[in-house]
Image (cartoon, grey):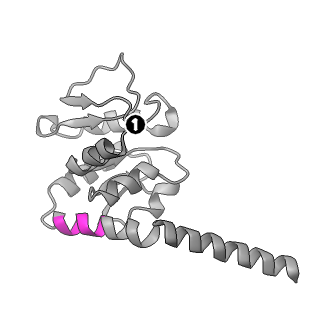
Amino acid sequence: GSQNSSDLYKGFSKFIEATSFLNMENYLVCFFGNLDKRSEFNFNYISFGYVDSPEILRNIYAAADVFVAPSIMEAFGKTIAESMLCGTPAVCFDSTGPKDIVSHKLNGYLACPYVSQDIAKGIEWIVNNDNYDSLRDSAISKVMNNFNMKVIAKKYLDLYKKSLRRYES
């Protein structure tokens, strides 16, 4: 999912490169967002285009076996958290914001930064995992316990209190 698949920071080229290490006959790739219309792929895919319905987006996430986020630079990775909340384990690079969302081999796979072959390895690791249901449950728990509104609001409140204490000192 991306507003602009040609944005260097979204790492789309890393994903395409990763597909060369996979038997793509075993996969159906689903995209959402703005996919470059000139793109031609050597694998089966569906492009849902821009999705503005939360219900449809939830269904897309939940129907997937794995969510791949090959971003080179990402402040947080909202789509990763959304997919995990829908029970879909994620593969991303062990760098920038996403590394704080995914716990390696507990609810997803953290690939060696910018190594497409490791993204492919992560995809296969998740899809062929004997404990897939545990990965799904762990993905949901991670997001619910660390990124729900109450948890985030408390973190902001604690930060404000800490800042005020420094100011008052």
Task: Where is residue 66? Give x, y as percent.
Answer: 25, 50
Question: Magenta part mainly helix, strand or loop?
Answer: helix
Q: Is residue 93 above or below residue 20?
A: below
Q: Is residue 137 magenta?
A: yes
Q: Is residue 68 left or right of residue 27?
A: right
Q: Is residue 15 visible?
A: yes
Residue where numbered disc 1 is placed = 52
Q: Is residue 31 above or below residue 57?
A: above
State the residue at coordinates (46%, 27%).
6
Which residues fall within the magenta stretch? 133-139
Query: What kind of residue is marked 1?
Result: Asp
Frontmost residue, 153 versus 88: 153
Frontmost residue, 151 versus 35: 151
State the residue at coordinates (51%, 72%).
151
Q: Is residue 11 above or below residue 136?
A: above
Task: Where is residue 21? Give x, y as percent.
Answer: 23, 40
Q: Is residue 43 magenta?
A: no
Residue 164: quadrant of the picture: bottom right
The quarter of the picture where the N terminus appears is top left
State the residue at coordinates (85%, 76%).
167
The quarter of the picture where the C terminus appears is bottom right
Task: Where is residue 41? Give x, y as percent.
Answer: 26, 24
Q: Badge 1, how many Cα within 10 Å: few under 14, some, many 20+?
A: few
Q: Is residue 95 visible?
A: no
State the residue at coordinates (30%, 48%).
58
